[in-house]
Image (cartoon, helix red, strand yellow):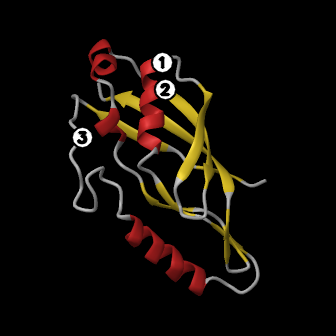
Amino acid sequence: MILAMLLFSQQVTSPATREPSPATESGTPAPSMVAAEIAEQIAAAPKRGTLWPKLLHKPPVSRFFPAASLLAGQEGEAVLRCRLRVTGSLDACTVALSSGVPALDAASLEWVADVRFRPQISNRKPVESDVILPVRWAIEH
């Protein structure tokens, strides 16, 4: 089992509304865009060996910062464990380490639904893997 670890941090000063990006209504890249990028990278991969997962898209966590937590000055870091599928999407995400604020933990799980990766590629074949994602919720002071 392979684990990859990435750190995402965002400073926010006020609640932000979720505005969709041009890609799709949710702001995530269109599945065909992700699939095309993954296919290109598989074709370019070495015939033997491993390419580790690569982040392709992450939305700003400020779009997901709970307004009540922001107003209350709540900050923290949640650590998520997710299964990275061969399609580049994440599922089976759980909070491996709580931020100490249930609303921030819940927002972390909402945020991760819009994260996209290139999957791990072994011998030119995409394979599933597990990833660990720390998500930092910070208010700029």
Quarter of the view holding residue 56: bottom left
What residue is at 21 percent from the left and 36 percent from the top?
Answer: 17
What residue is at 52 percent from the left and 45 percent from the top?
Answer: 7
Vertical relation: 68 (above or below) 65: above
Circle on res. 135: none
What's under tag 3, amino acid-wise? Arg
Q: Earlier in the sequence, mark 2 or mark 3?
A: 3
Quarter of the view holding residue 54: bottom right
Circles 2 and 3: CB atoms closer than 8 Å: no
Task: Give the alpha-carbon distance from disc 2 to disc 3, as whole Å.
Answer: 18 Å
Vertical relation: 69 (above or below) 86: above
Which residue does the numbered mark 3 point to in the structure image?
18
What's under tag 1, amino acid-wise? Pro
Indicate the position of residue 123 as horizontal and vertical percent values: 73, 79
Indicate the position of residue 57 as horizontal and vertical percent values: 41, 58
What residue is at 35 percent from the left and 55 percent from the top?
Answer: 28
Circle on res. 102: 1
Dot 3 crowding, Cα within 10 Å, few <14, some 14–19, many 20+: some
Circles 2 and 1: CB atoms closer than 8 Å: yes
Left or right relative to 40: residue 62 = left
Dot 2 crowding, Cα within 10 Å, few <14, some 14–19, many 20+: many
Indicate the position of residue 32 as horizontal and vertical percent values: 40, 71
Q: Earlier in the sequence, mark 1 or mark 3?
A: 3
Circle on res. 105: 2
Looking at the rendered structure, the secondary structure element under dot 3 is: loop
